Image (cartoon, rainbow, N blue to C red):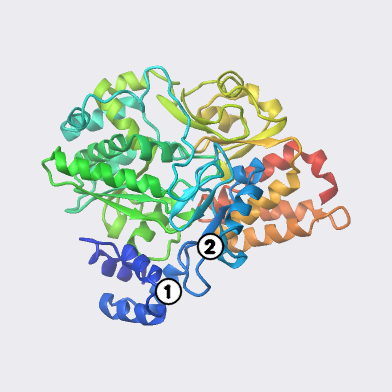
Amino acid sequence: MSKNLRALSARFAKNKTLFQTLTEIVENREAPLERKLTAFADESLISPAALLGSASFYDFLYTQQTPKRAHLCNGTSCQLSGRQAEARAILAQRYTPEEIGQAACLGHCYHGGAYWQEGHTCDTTSGPGEKASAIPFFPATNSIFNAPLASLDALYQTTRLAADRICDELTASRLRGRGGAGFPFATKLASCAQADAAQKYIVCNADEGDPGAFSDRYLLEHQPHRVLAGMLAAAEATGANTGYLYIRAEYPQAQQCMAAAISEFEANGVTENGFQFHIVRGAGAYICGEESALLNSIEGLRPEVRLRPPYPAQAGLFGQPTLVSNVETFAAIPWILQHGGAAFAARGTDLATGTKLVCLDAGFKQPGVYEVEMGTALIQLIEERAGGFRQPAKAVQVGGPLGSIVPLERLAGLQLDFESFAQAGFLLGHAGIVAIPRTFPMIDLLRHLFSYMADESCGKCLPCRLGTEKGQHLLQQASAATPLSRQLFDELLETLELGSLCALGGGLPLPVRNILDYFGEELEEYFQP
């Protein structure tokens, strides 16, 4: 069924994707939704049930209930910032409780108190139409992401290399994907380049939804041409002629900045191969950070995780070979091609080369995006560059809700690279870091993690769909009077880890076990042996 729907969806891709059309239909309230979906179903040859099944998935599309006019951020950082009551009070002045919903992280973790209203993302320092608080950025020496640009033509000139030369430099750089998994980028590039197909795609995953992460938002808003140049270089290397940037709905300013950059790119005529960029605006779904769910979303299908193989490099967007990578990875490519892969590999560590963007949330004295050499000591970043914690803390969350929970006593032994974290039983992920105050109960953090994942699960696989809901229910019921069976809870974690199709269900057990292992004494009354 999905293959047939995908083929029908591909017919709409020339000017506007099926998802974009579907979004416009749902957001237009001038006619009853049922009537509009029926008419579009006749036009697209896709059943109304399939269209409704896709549209009803998203937080910002409303197919049954009264549309929400505002959303309060429910990300971990905002939950801990202490500013959400103020944000809620601001919204309450303009909206009824029924008009206010909740949204996943809005990317204002460096301040907190974030909310979304009528197409604008704000925090307690700003309102609609006002400039939101700026993202503090602290570059590394000889910055890869913030070096001055001589001209747009000079930047895009770095992509005018032979495909083999681009592949060779990226192979020499040993660049690993910055989205969280750390997969070697050149391997993914080569796989797509070797695929035999007349049509190929480059897709930039700008659905940065991890609470505590806002580095992609910084790059989209302040370094948009670096992102485009990286995508263009990947296209030259793979033979692709079309690129899609999937930018989350919660980042409206980023969408505007990227649209303006694409217009500049087209006006300057800096490419001769007819490569075209397209922006697709998300509609509020954390799972779309997973690459196959993101591809389904662009196609207008329900954004559920795909079974693999085949991988996107063989059968991705519209069933064609597709290179999918994240914003930071693409933004690093121009520097690599300008200075050489060996120069990039000389920075960082042997296994994790180059620099990495690390986000520190409002729980630190100097929050913001820090560019650091891979291998930098975590404690050095926190204490020397960020000035330490704003209030006494007992742990940090690293890499979002599917990352890890690191107690303070383990900070000193960690370096900011994939291997250091993995060897210690943690995960670096996208490297968003949230400070957890000493006063915040760890049972509430456990409840928050399961509640967040239960809300955001795509529902395709049984272990994740039921497991996250079951965990949420068990933790809500747990108390000193009715403690939870630790054996039962451990079995649930094992089922999630081994049975889930993707990292949403499969990755949740790691931070949960971190909490259980390091804060067992605090949680003792909630669990029975």
* Residue type marked 1: Leu
In the current view of this chain or complex, which residue is farthest to the right?
Answer: 481
Q: Where is residue 128 in the image (x, y as percent from the top left)?
A: 46, 51
Q: Nearer the viewer, residue 458 or 174?
A: 458
Is residue 230 something one can see in this rendering?
yes
Residue at position x 34%, y 31% in the image:
332
Compared to residue 453, the image places residue 111 above or below, namely above
Q: How crowded is mark 1: few (under 14 residues within 10 Å), some or many (20 or more)?
A: some
Q: Nearer the viewer, residue 122 or 318?
A: 122
Q: Where is residue 285 in the image (x, y as percent from the top left)?
A: 48, 57
Q: Position of residue 390 (x, y in %)?
A: 66, 29
Q: Which of marks 1 and 2 is in front?
A: 1
Q: Does dot 1 land on a helix, a strand or a loop?
A: helix
Left or right side of 23 for 88: right
Left or right side of 381 for 292: left
Quarter of the image with the N terminus is bottom left
Point out which mark residue 52 bears: 1
Compared to residue 185, the image places residue 401 above or below, namely below
Q: Residues within 10 Å of mark 2 (few under 14, many from 20)?
A: some
